Amino acid sequence: MKVMITGTAGFIGFHLVKLLIQDGHEVVGIDSINDYYDINLKYDRLKETGIDKEAIQEGTAVQSTTLSGYRFVKLGLEDKEGILELFKKERFDVVVNLAAQAGVRYSLINPHTYIDANITGFLNILEGCRHYPVKHLIYASSSSVYGANTKMPFSVNHNVDHPVSLYATSKKANELMAHTYANLFNIPSTGLRFFTVYGPWGRPDMALFLFTKAITENKPIDVFNHGEMMRDFTYIDDIVESIRRLVPKPPVASTSWSGDNPDPATSFAPYQIFNIGNSNPVKLMDFVKEIEKNLGREAEKNMMDIQPGDVPKTWADVEALFDYTDYRPKYTIKEGIKNFIEWYKDYYKVSV
């Protein structure tokens, strides 16, 4: 199939490109390459997939020099005309929308970027799917949508109407927008609530990256909520393998869905929501200890209050995804952290 992946200079998109190309799909990737974090890391990810920085031109497809089925276009989701023109020209079978303005804490100081990228940008993707129909739209939501929920594990069948950050709100809005378009225009849509993704080539604003960088530079790490945090850390290979299995499996309308007792995860329209996590929450301090063990040194810790917009614990119920894809996440933090730190030391030429 011909697959459009947005955010292919990003963490998850970069890994997914390689996996789908292995399967024989033709992939067109897009990314705005914004400066939310170090653009050199983004360009290096692109380089790993055969896209040379010097060859990139705004709005023009660049052929990968190493992956024959992959082309890349520098393009932002907010570019309405550019997105529609790309849909018109390429006629995609599947769209995987991973591009977004990420980060809970960043949304406290730059709220407008979340509306531009995550709301307006996603609307442009939906309009592309509407006017140039696709077989399946897969899009990134987030575990952040669970907000003030405390019933564990988080289930896609739970109500999620109490977000605690604008980032979470934008992701919840994506789910509602996708449902509307699934209903009105019969676009089969699958939303994925990612739970704290980590691994090689990961984002510099995430805890594993921040902690590793600080410890190797002999700087203190900021430990929020005084270490009383738990996260359902999910390794990148588990994430992209799940998406890979979802690509050829678009949802269909549920014949058992009832408006008298509405299930938030399914619909009378071709629409579904899945958690995509490890389903094994880890204490933040245990996570830190594993990093320290791999680096061979102890971190100096600044114990701090929980930040606005953060939640103290996440835990994914992934049974629905397992049943649908026959894949259960398998990587432990022991394996995942080891792989990340080996990559980090090689990429940044760090000797510990």
Image: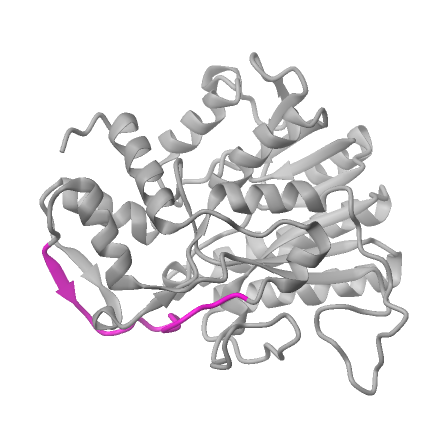
Q: Is 332 positioned to the left or the right of 115 in the image?
A: left
Tally the numbered discs.
0
Q: Is 214 positioned to the left or the right of 148 in the image?
A: left
Q: Is residue 302 magenta?
A: yes
- Examine the rendering and report whether any part of residue 302 can be seen: yes
**Quarter containing the N terminus:** top right
Q: Is residue 289 magenta?
A: no
The single residue placed furthest to the top in the displayed view is 65
Depicted 28 relative to depicted 327: above or below: above
Residue occupying image coordinates x 29% and y 32%: 342
The magenta-colored residue range is: 300-316
Where does residue 11 sit, x and y in percent of width and height? Answer: 47, 40
Colouring method of the image: one colour
Residue occupying image coordinates x 15% and y 40%: 216
How would you classify the magenta stretch by its main secondary structure?
Answer: loop
Residue occupying image coordinates x 52% and y 65%: 316
Where does residue 7 sit, x and y in percent of width and height? Answer: 56, 40
- Examine the rendering and report whether any part of residue 204 can be seen: no
Front residue (pair 81, 174) = 174
Residue occupying image coordinates x 25% and y 67%: 224
Where does residue 57 sit, x and y in percent of width and height? Answer: 56, 22
**Quarter containing the C terminus:** top left
The single residue placed furthest to the right in the displayed view is 255
Depicted 123 relative to depicted 257: above or below: above
Where does residue 341 sit, x and y in percent of width and height? Answer: 28, 38
